[in-house]
Image: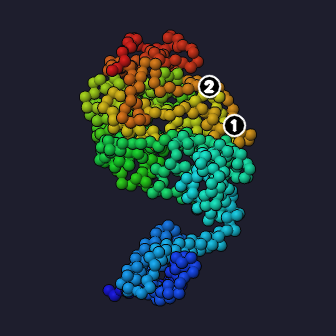
Amino acid sequence: MKRDLLPRLSPRSFFVFAFDLLIVAIAWLGSFLLRFNLSVPDEYWITALETLAWVLPVYGTVLLFSGLYRGLWLFASLPDLIRIAKAVVVAGSLVAFVAYLLQLSVAPPRTVMLLSPLLLIFLMGGARAAYRVWREKQRFGDLIALGKPVLILGAGRAGASLVRELQSSSEWRVAGLLDDDVSKHGREILGHKVLGSFDQLPALAEKLQSRNAIIAIPTGSAVERQRAATLCLRAGVKGMTVPPVADLINGRVTLSNVRQINLEDLLGREPVWIDAGPVRALLAERTVLVTGAGGSIGSELCRQIARYKPGKIIFVEHSEYALYRLQEEFASAFTEVPIIALIGDVKDAQRMDQIVRDMRPSIIFHAAAYKHVPLMEDQNAWQAVLNNVVGTHVVASTAVRHGVQRFVLISTDKAVNPTNVMGATKRLAEMVCQGLQQDAQSTAMIVVRFGNVLGSAGSVIPKFQEQAARGGPLTVTHPDVTRYFMSIPEASQLVLQAASMGDGGQIFVLDMGQPVRIADLARDIIRLSGFSEDTVRIEYTGLRAGEKLFEETISQDENLIDTPHPKLRVANARAVLATDVAAILRHIATTDATSRTAALHFIETWLPEYSRSDGTTVPIDETSTSDCPVPALHPQSA
């Protein structure tokens, strides 16, 4: 195919090329003027003019083939300057070589050979930069003045990138930057001054009438980003943020990356690090079964499992609607992952046996449970016993019977020194797994214990958000009540990591970070919703039945053992025998009454660490049970 020897230039590119040749002439003659302090001897001036006749073609040829005329001056940037420098160095070297070959009687001074390329790079690069600034001023100058003032928190590379983009925005106008690095105070970034530290945000926002701020510290720690987000809320400023650098594409910050501050920013939790190798080895091409698959934790577990290309995921769920929604989600978002959606009650031994026998899973994640503390405390207490204790035994014993390699129970920090029925039944579910492990030859029983997760169904955060949307009040039980929080994806990833690490009998405890005061959380949600405490108030209602002021991660007779993962530890819990599990189930099976009283009597019989939040005891004659021996307390497991 015939090709043109010379690059084709558009009329505009030809004009730029001609302009560059004029600059070459100016740089060449100007270097002679500089060399001789503006007083060039006649013989050298003649040489300058005569040599220009071949210097221009040399430079012109190199520049023409360098690719400089494919771009637009409006978008000239560092790569264009580098391309200019390379072309000028090549052309300057050729000029010096030609001058040597010609053996001129009055040769150009060597200083000119060095000065002219440097001067040419400066003039060509400067002309392009000046044109870009002028054009952007013409296009955006009037719009920039009309934008909303915004303060940028962070005067590093991310902040500078945002300033550059905001300069061409019609919506925003940079009012200034803030940074905790004192050495940056008073300096300017692209014409905008670093006004002070983060702590000065309230005063500067008021002074500059800026009701918006962007946090631009993607490489900062979670604690630093949390502090900045909290300062925005406390100052009454609408806060936006650039995500952590790990979440940025190619690590570059652009205006499209900016999002509103959310609750996860306010928790200040570092991103979870997962050793993907063992998790992939556990899940890839395997059949995985998840009970409670339609719930908050169960559904996120399914999503995380799907990332590791399992052979098949079996959804087991009691709620038809929740199962349908999860099935529809996977049909659109995870089309490459085979799934089977099954309705089933974990208390139904026959159904569970059929599912495990037919599906033959390699691993079961048991997330099905009743978890709402107040709801399980009174009229539904015995149902909590049946679902959380008997249901766990049905699924776990079925796993053992059919040789499932791993069974993972999702537990809760409320199982530690429980003061409510839900927490007590989850501790008993843990004991069921510990006891079954004694006789399980081919199944590893693993328990993972963690606290509250952000946004789970029925949790405090969606409740607060709904109350704020209605105009309040936000109901908080006690001014000093605290809870541990983590995100649902974070908890689910750590569950998978624990499942890959456990070899049977362990209770893994997730590092939940620092506890969060619920009253502060309510205030933050009010501000995130665009209100103030003057318009949406907080109402204290008193602790509900079964609630604690604070949660614990281990009980009095447990201690924690470190693991290779910094956010996973193992609780060295009290030993449980298989005979204990049999006695627990016999006690349940032979209880005639199904009242709250019967449930509390059963719990107090088997959990010496359980203490009722109201301080009362259960009259024995109000329950009807068969003769069950009082359980012996076994020494702590090694």
Looking at the picture, tell me which residue is in the foreground, 453 or 226: 226
Give the colour scheme shown: rainbow
Q: Is residue 210 visible?
A: yes
Instruction: Answer with the quarter of the image where residue 397 lies.
Output: top left
Where does residue 203 sit, x and y in percent of width and height? 71, 45
Q: Earlier in the sequence, mark 2 or mark 1?
A: 1
At a point 52% along the width and 46% down the height, the residue shown is 220
- Mark 1 belongs to which amino acid? Pro
Looking at the picture, tell me which residue is in the foreground, 121 or 139: 121
Which numbered dot is residue 29?
A: none
Where does residue 432 sit, x and y in percent of width and height? 37, 25
Locate the N terminus and report the quarter of the image it occupies: bottom left
At a point 37% along the width and 82% down the height, the residue shown is 100
According to the picture, the residue beneath numbered tag 2 turns out to be 543
- Mark 2 belongs to which amino acid? Leu
Residue 54, relative to residue 463: is it above or below? below
According to the picture, the residue beneath numbered tag 1 turns out to be 473
Looking at the picture, tell me which residue is in the foreground, 184 or 518: 184
Q: Is residue 20 visible?
A: no
Whole-Å distance between the Cαs marked 2 and 1? 17 Å
Where does residue 252 sit, x and y in percent of width and height? 49, 57
Q: Residues within 10 Å of mark 2 (few under 14, many from 20)?
A: some
